[in-house]
Structure formats: C-alpha cells, structure tokens
Image (spheres, grey):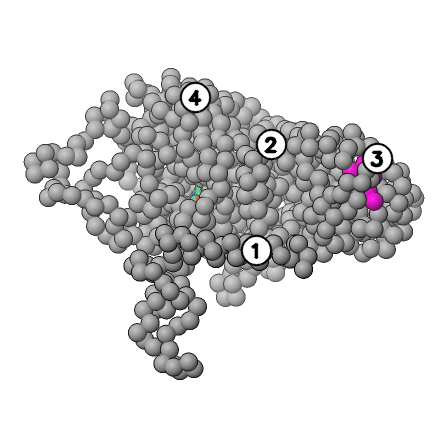
C-alpha cells in the first residue's frame, strides 16, 4: 500500500483510539447521557420496525428538523470575522466615546460583510451593494456601525424600503432571478424613483463587483452626530478605507466566478485570515460643525447624498484588523445581530428619515429571525459590559436573575440596578430643538436627485464610465417590457446625455435628443406637485477624484494569486526565482497543470501542482504565467483548457507573463485584436520579464488592453 493511501487510515485509527481513551469526550445526548450506539436506531428485531421509545433517535432528528432559522430578509448571504480596532488619533475634542478618544486601546470587533438581494446560498459575485457591519465590543456597551460599501442609498425615507426590496428580490410569481437586479420589477421601480439614481450609478459601477471583501471601502451612509463632554454636537460621516486599496473584477468575470466558485469572497476572506494576511481598514471621519449644517447644496439628512471629500477631507483615526475566523459559522456569523441603534455615549443619531426607520427595523427583524427578545444573550451578541436591568424571562432566557426585585424604583433590591449619572457613562440623547407641524411629507431640500449622480459619473475615468455604460446595457437588456427600458433611458438623460444615448443604442430604445422631464410617480394624489418636482442642476464641483477607483489605485501585489500554467510532462525552469520575487511582494504562485501531484523544477527539486485545468479556472486568479520549459506553442494550444485560461486572462485585462520559448503561443491564440495583423507582446500589454510582470500585477489590471477588444 502506498504511503499516501495509508495516512488517512492511520489518522482514523488514532482518532478512534483517542475517543475511547478520553472519557470526557464521549458522545452524549442533549441531556448529558453517554451514547453507546450512534449508528443504529432501536428496533423490534434485527429487521423489524423502529420503536417510538428510541429517545436518542428522536432527539437527534428533532434537533435536525429545527436546525434552520429564517434567513435575513435582506443581507442574507454573509461572511464574518473577528478582529480588533485600535485608535491612533484621538477625537476627544468632538466626542466622549472612549473608542474614539483612547489612543492605543484595542477594542474587540466582529465584522460581517454581505450581499443584499440574494438568499443565503446565492453567489458572492452578484452585482449588488455589500453590507459592511462592524460590532465594537466596548467597555461602555456594544456599538454597531452598520454600513455598506457604497456611501449613499436608493431611497430617502424608510417608508419605501419594503417596496425597494420587493422590487429587487426575485419576482414573486416564479422566484426568478436569484441575486440579480437585472429584471423588470427592479428597473420598473427605479425608473419611477429618481431619488435612487445616484445609488444606481454606484451599483452599476465596478464597486458592486469587488475583487475581494478585503478590497472594499465601507461607509456609515447616514450623517451621525459625535457628542463631546460639553454636550456639543458635530456631524460625522464614517468611512472605512482598505489598506489593500479598492479593486474590482469585470462583469464577465463576475458571472463566470459565480459558476466556478460561488463562495469566492467567503473563501478569499477565510484563507487570507488563516494564512496570516490579516485584512486591515483605516477608519476615517468627515467632521462638519453644527454651524456648517446648511452650507452644502444638498441636505445632510438626505441619505442619497454624500459629502464630497474635495469639500470635507476624511480624517483617519484608527485601524481595524480582522485576525480570527469564526469557529462556527452559524453560532457567530449567522446569529450576530446588528442594529444602528446600538450606541455608546458620545455618538448619536440625526433626523435622517431613513436612519430613523432603521432604528425600528433591526430589533423587530431579530425577533422573527432569532425568535426571542433574548437574542442579546447569544455569545456573539453579548456585551462585555455586564447586563443589569429589569427585563425578564422570554424564550430561551440564559441569565438567572436572582432576588425578588424586577422593577425600578425598588427598596427590595436595595435600589439596584441604579441609573448611571451622565458623568459615569449614563447615555443621554442629544438635546435638539424641534419646532414643526406633524406632517407626512418630504423636505424640498431632498428634491435634487440628479446632481450627485452626475458628479459620480463625471468623476470616473473613461474606463470606469464605459463599465457603467456596459452594466446598464446588460441590466436593461434583460428587462422584457420596452416601456420600462424607455422610462429608464429618460431618467438617465437627466444625469448625462451621452450616457443615456449609449445605453439607448444597445437596448432598442429611441436615442434621446434632449433631457426628459423627470418623473416622480410616488407623489400623493392630492399633494402640492411643485413641492415634489425634481430639481435638475449641476453639482457644485464638477469632479471629485475620491469617487473613482482607478484614480486612487493602490499599487500592491500583496495577497494576489498567480497561476503558473504548465503541461505536466516538462521540467519547469526559473520557477523558484519567480516564486521568490512574487513572495517578496506578498503574492502567491500556484502551479496549474493537467493533474495533481508534483513536477520537477530544474535543480532536481519538485514543486506541488496545486490545481488542475479541470478544477480551477482563469477567473479565480489575478494573473497568469505561461510556463517556460520545452513546451511548444502548438502543444499548449492543443490543450483546449489552456487556451480558454489564457483567453479569459487576456480578455479580463489580467497581467500575463509569457516565459521564453512560448511567446508564439499568445500570437497563435487567435485573439480578436490580432485577426488581421500580428501584434507583439508589448502591443498586447503582455510581459516577457518577471520585473515587468510584477509591476503589472501591482496595478491590478491592464485597462489599456480593453481598447484592443
Ligand atoms: Fe439594513 N436591514 N435596512 N441597511 N442592513 C438589515 O436587519 C433596513 C439600510 C444593513 O450583517 C436587516 O438583521 C431598513 C441602509 C446591513 O447582519 C433589516 C432600511 C444600510 C445589514 C434591515 C435599511 C443598511 C442590514 C435584515 C431602510 C447602510 C446586514 C437583517 C430604512 C447604511 C447586517 C437584519 C448583518 C440588515 C432593515 C437600509 C445596512 C430588515 C428598514 C441605508 C449591513 O432589519
């Protein structure tokens, strides 16, 4: 018997022996009874019927039958990790929240990233907003910053949230499509809701198809308040800036990844943490004084607007490092319960009507999802500050409250628990003067729906603008009702005529000649229409570089995966040298060939073939090396999968290194751009030296190649 075959058996034997030896690890029922036979149910005779008496079988099956809980109504699919937040710059002039004043203190955190529309088992690479929720376990109680990877939202008022979610979820008659906005109901709703257009620009941009959860920005979205120890308030917008920079994949790539590895983001986050490449983000704040509340040409309370970084720079204050994977997905990532209303003294809300609605929704949803008002007692949700109050009982109560007193004020419990003074950390809502009629309306200051959509589009590079156009063409081409496509093009005319024309061209809609009158179907029948008419104007600034991914590109090859393609029969040359260079930059080189096993690498050494052409794919790598050795171009081309691998890498603008001897391979690939004339490697933006390749890798993609396609 070969050694490799023997190993698992040996392991199994060791395991069995240990289990028998270690009495403490004996299997038990939920009541603690040691189980002797977990393989067979209790029967009347060898081949007879099973007996109702078999409480062990019943317990096991009953528990299994109730294993599932309702998934989150939105953000059902997620990945989480533990970590720490460490402050490096104090905000003590603005807030009394200790996490933002005590420099150097490490606060434990649990962070969950998610997609929004898809169900729990859907793909990671859907075109969608990503949730970015952080729970800080502070000594003053849990603080949750429940944000997204896009700084604005689709709607201005919580009242519209169920409509938005119904529109984007799979259509109710046939439950199609899963985790996709490219369908009639979503675009019908959007085409009638101009307030969503700014967010639509972001969702159609590459932000909605991140390369990795580790390479996304995060935003608190709403304007919040910081409150200092003099009870003075400063408006604040929160930002998370990833240390690895912001990077995305291409839409064609995203769709293919969804088929090849729908856990791509989950696996990437998990592996990075397991390998010690701990993802890091800088927390940043934009601070706006109370006096400046009205100095902007939009309303700070409107969640469809951002504060341009060109107007208020982001001040970086601390670092979040995710350094530990959950031990159990269900217990931690699934059961974690975030809430924008989980606050600590020093942070407070504003009257943003979307935020105000969220403050109701999150506890309400946990009651049906986790099934009890005691969800705060689940380990992942527990505050590190002891809980003392007069809330009692309820399903699955864990805390054993002693004594006779469960009310306040009392003498029976010696007056405990006491109310905390403000100076001792007692929470006190910010006092804000409110004078107004009770009225169901939207402020006129919320009616400019286009200028920031335009600012976003105009701030993008040409490549990024083209990606937005491509995304809109794709999404709207999936809409079956022509009237919806027309309405959508009308909406786009108010953002940018060129954008609207290019989209119209591809989706069978008449090319618009002038901006259309904005629609707003949601106006109540007897409302004053002038109050609701959209304001169409230019943004104050014409462009803000912070909004573009490419203009802020962080050059780094760190944690990138490079595939080294080779046919198994050849000894591969120069591998060690290349691996060393990549390793120095933090990148990983993996050999992909026709079979698993080992391959010779020159000096008599061997290297592991970690993937094969049949179990992996170009879209799962950041870059490609086409191996040296004695393989001929014809041999490589003869292998269909090698060809497909290389074509995809080329089309997705990935760095490619062609080692000497196989340069001809690329020329013979039959690239669309080379049909009439032969192009050289450099004309195709392909590297032939490892140093050039490393530079390309650190730039993420060779966008110039898109022009050849
Ligand atoms: Fe949420 N949202 N949301 N949301 N949201 C939920 O709460 C809701 C909004 C966000 O990883 C739900 O526990 C309403 C904006 C994240 O567990 C639910 C409105 C932003 C997560 C809910 C919004 C978010 C949620 C579903 C409009 C960015 C996942 C499960 C008024 C600032 C948290 C749950 C996690 C989850 C309601 C809008 C972020 C139903 C009513 C804006 C990251 O309570």
Residue receiving disc 2: 244
Cα–Cα gap, marks 3 and 1: 47 Å
Main SS of residues in magenta: loop
Q: Which residue is mark 4?
A: 104
Q: Secondary structure at mark 1?
A: helix
* Sequence-earlier tag: 3 or 2: 2
Q: Which residue is mark 3?
A: 688
Mark 1 or 2, closer to the camera = 1
Residue labelled 1 has its Cβ within 8 Å of some atom of ligand 1: no
| 381 relative to 500 in the view: left or right | left
Q: Residue at x 73, y 35 (%)?
A: 579
User: For residue 157, which quarter of the picture?
Assistant: top left
Please say if 660 is above or below 39: above
Q: Quadrant of the C terminus?
A: top right
Circle nearer the N terminus (1, 2)? 1
Q: Is residue 430 visible?
A: yes
The residue at the far right in this view is: 677
Q: Which residue is painted at 45% across and 19% down in the image? A: 89
Judge whether 292 appears above or below 593 on screen: above
Front label number (3 vs 1): 1
Q: Is residue 54 magenta?
A: no
- Gap between marks 1 and 2 measured at Cα: 42 Å
In the picture of the structure, the residue carrying the numbered disc 1 is 10
Asked if marks 1 and 2 touch (Cβ < 8 Å), the reply is no
């Amino acid at each position: 018997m070969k050694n490799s075959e023997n190993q698992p058996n040996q392991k199994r034997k060791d395991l069995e022996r240990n289990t028998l030896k270690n009495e403490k690890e004996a299997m038990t029922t939920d009541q603690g009874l040691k189980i002797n036979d977990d393989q067979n149910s209790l029967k009347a005779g060898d081949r007879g019927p099973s007996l109702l008496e078999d409480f062990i079988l019943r317990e096991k099956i009953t528990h299994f039958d109730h294993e599932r809980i309702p998934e989150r109504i939105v953000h059902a699919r997620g990945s989480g990790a533990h970590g720490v937040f460490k402050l490096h710059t104090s905000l003590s002039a603005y807030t009394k929240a200790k996490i933002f004043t005590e420099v150097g203190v490490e606060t434990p955190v649990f962070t969950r990233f998610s997609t929004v529309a898809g169900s729990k088992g859907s793909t990671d690479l859907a075109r969608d907003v990503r949730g970015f929720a952080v729970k800080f376990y502070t000594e003053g109680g849990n603080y949750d910053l429940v944000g997204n990877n896009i700084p604005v939202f689709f709607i201005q008022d919580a009242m519209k949230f169920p409509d938005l979610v119904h529109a984007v979820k799979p259509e109710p008659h046939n439950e199609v499509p899963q985790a996709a906005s490219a369908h009639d109901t979503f675009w019908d709703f959007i085409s009638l809701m101009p307030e969503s257009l700014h967010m639509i620009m972001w969702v159609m941009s590459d932000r909605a198809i991140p390369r990795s959860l580790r390479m996304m920005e995060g935003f608190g979205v709403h304007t919040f308040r910081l409150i200092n120890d003099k009870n003075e308030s400063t408006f604040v917008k929160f930002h998370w800036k990833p240390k690895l920079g912001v990077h995305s994949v291409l839409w064609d790539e995203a769709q293919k990844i969804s088929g090849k590895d729908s856990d791509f983001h989950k696996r990437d986050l998990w592996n990075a943490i397991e390998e010690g490449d701990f993802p890091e983000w800088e927390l940043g704040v934009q601070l706006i004084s109370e006096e400046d509340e009205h100095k902007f040409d939009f309303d700070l309370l409107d969640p469809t607007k951002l504060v341009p970084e060109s107007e208020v720079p982001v001040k970086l204050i601390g670092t979040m490092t995710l350094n530990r994977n959950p031990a159990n997905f269900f217990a931690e990532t699934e059961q974690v319960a975030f809430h924008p209303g989980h606050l600590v003294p020093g942070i407070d809300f504003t009257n943003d009507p979307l935020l105000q609605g969220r403050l109701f929704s999150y506890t309400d949803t946990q009651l049906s999802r986790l099934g009890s008002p005691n969800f705060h007692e689940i380990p992942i949700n527990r505050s590190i500050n002891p809980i003392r109050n007069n809330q009692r009982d309820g399903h699955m109560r864990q805390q054993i409250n002693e004594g006779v007193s469960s009310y306040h004020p009392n003498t029976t419990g010696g007056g405990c628990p006491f109310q905390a003074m403000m100076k001792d950390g007692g929470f006190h809502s910010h006092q804000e003067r409110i004078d107004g009629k009770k009225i169901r309306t939207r402020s006129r200051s919320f009616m400019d729906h286009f200028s920031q959509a335009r600012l976003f589009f105009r701030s993008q590079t040409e490549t990024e603008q083209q990606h937005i156009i491509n995304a809109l063409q794709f999404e709207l081409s999936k809409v079956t009702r022509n009237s919806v496509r027309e309405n959508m093009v009308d909406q786009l005319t108010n953002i940018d005529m060129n954008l609207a024309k290019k989209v119209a061209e591809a989706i069978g809609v008449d090319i618009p000649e002038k901006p259309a009158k904005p629609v707003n179907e949601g106006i109540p029948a007897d409302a004053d229409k002038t109050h609701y008419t959209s304001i169409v104007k230019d943004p104050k600034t014409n462009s803000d570089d912070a909004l573009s991914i490419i203009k802020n590109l962080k050059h780094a090859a760190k944690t990138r995966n490079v595939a080294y393609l080779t046919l198994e029969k050849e000894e591969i040359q120069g591998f060690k040298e290349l691996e060393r260079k990549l390793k120095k930059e933090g990148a990983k080189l993996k050999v992909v060939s026709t079979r698993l096993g080992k391959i010779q690498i020159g000096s008599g050494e061997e290297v592991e073939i970690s993937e094969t052409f049949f179990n992996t794919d170009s879209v799962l790598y950041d870059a490609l090396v086409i191996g040296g050795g004695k393989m001929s171009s014809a041999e490589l081309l003869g292998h269909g999968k090698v060809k497909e691998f290389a074509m995809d890498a080329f089309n997705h603008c990935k760095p490619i290194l062609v080692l000497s001897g196989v340069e001809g391979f690329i020329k013979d690939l039959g690239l669309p751009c080379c049909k009439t004339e032969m192009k050289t490697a450099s004309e195709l933006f392909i590297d032939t030296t490892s140093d050039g390749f490393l530079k390309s890798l650190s730039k993420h993609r060779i966008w110039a190649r898109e022009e050849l396609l």
